[in-house]
Image: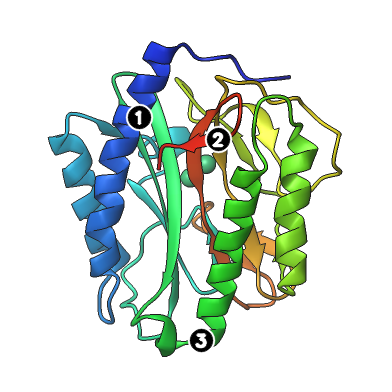
Amino acid sequence: MGGRIKTPAEIEKMRASARILRQVQGALKPLCVAGAKFTEMDAVAEDIIRLAGAVPSFKGFAGFPATLCTMRNEEVVHGIPHDVPLEQGDLVSIDCGVLLDGWHADAAFSLVVGGPTANPGREKFQQVVYAALQAGCGAIRHGVRVGDVGGVISQVVRQGGYSICKEFTGHGLGQELHEDPHIFNYGNPGTGTKLLAGMTLAVEPIVARGKPKVKTLADKWTVVTVDGRDACQWEHCGVVTTDGFEIFV
Ligand code: MG
Ligand code: MG
């Protein structure tokens, strides 16, 4: 099933949510240093969101307890912020959602603590996941199908020598955090739901550096790789247009 087409006024509301999320990301990136803790970043993010008159989308969603999903190294997605101090060379992915005036924004970024030279292998990995996201977003325009997008994403990931964690997908986004359609990170060109101008989507490759098998920890949220190797998530949200995909954040 396809996602509902949003009106220009609704799209403008999502841009406003995304502006707050961009502010959150801008504040968090410089905090990702050796010794920092995800719990501290979570408090910073929640403050920014609430001061802007918005609400953290994730907090309370299906019982999730925090503003951010925070992932370090082998943590894949849905990480509950923990107190483990970050170390130089750690791979960090941070996912956040903002609900303003009834409309969600949802996006994630990834980086290496201490910068690219602190761990070149991890830097290359996260850059390939970012490139996969860019390629996927670049494939979107009115009339393409979900399989066209997923096919491009998986091709970039495979060429880098990494694996898609297929359990997790992008999604439609709007008044609900997860709407139709699923935006798979794999697929065959010309297949799947047709994307139409005015659909608002989150595109989010979730990738393992080794084998893609995952498990959920006893906290019932944090997903980790079974082989203990790194994972990475990047995510943009935006709107399908007649000739492309306008990225909100
Ligand atoms: Mg997200
Ligand atoms: Mg999402």
Q: Position of residue 143 (x, y in %)?
A: 73, 25
Q: Give the numbered dot on residue 120.
A: 3
Left/right of residue 182 with respect to residue 101 in the rendered view: right
Identity of the amino acid at label 2? Answer: Phe
The Cα atoms of the two marked residues, 1 and 3, are separated by 34 Å
Which image quarter is the C terminus in? top left
Specify the quadrant of the image occupied by residue 58: top left
The residue beneath circle 1 is 15
Identity of the amino acid at label 3? Answer: Pro
**Residue at the outermost front position:** 243
What secondary structure is found at the residue carrying circle 3? Answer: helix
Which image quarter is the N terminus in? top right
Decide if ligand 1 comes within 8 Å of the CB at mark 3.
Answer: no
Left/right of residue 200 with respect to residue 191 in the rendered view: left
Q: Is residue 99 visible?
A: no
Position of residue 3 relative to residue 39, above or below, is: above
Specify the quadrant of the image occupied by residue 125: bottom right
The residue beneath circle 2 is 245
Q: Is residue 51 visible?
A: yes
| Foreground tag (1 vs 2) | 2
Please give the count of numbered marks on the rendered protein: 3
The Cα atoms of the two marked residues, 1 and 2, are separated by 13 Å
Q: Count residues near mark 1 (Cα–Cα under 10 Å), then give few for <14, some for 14-19, many for 20+.
A: many
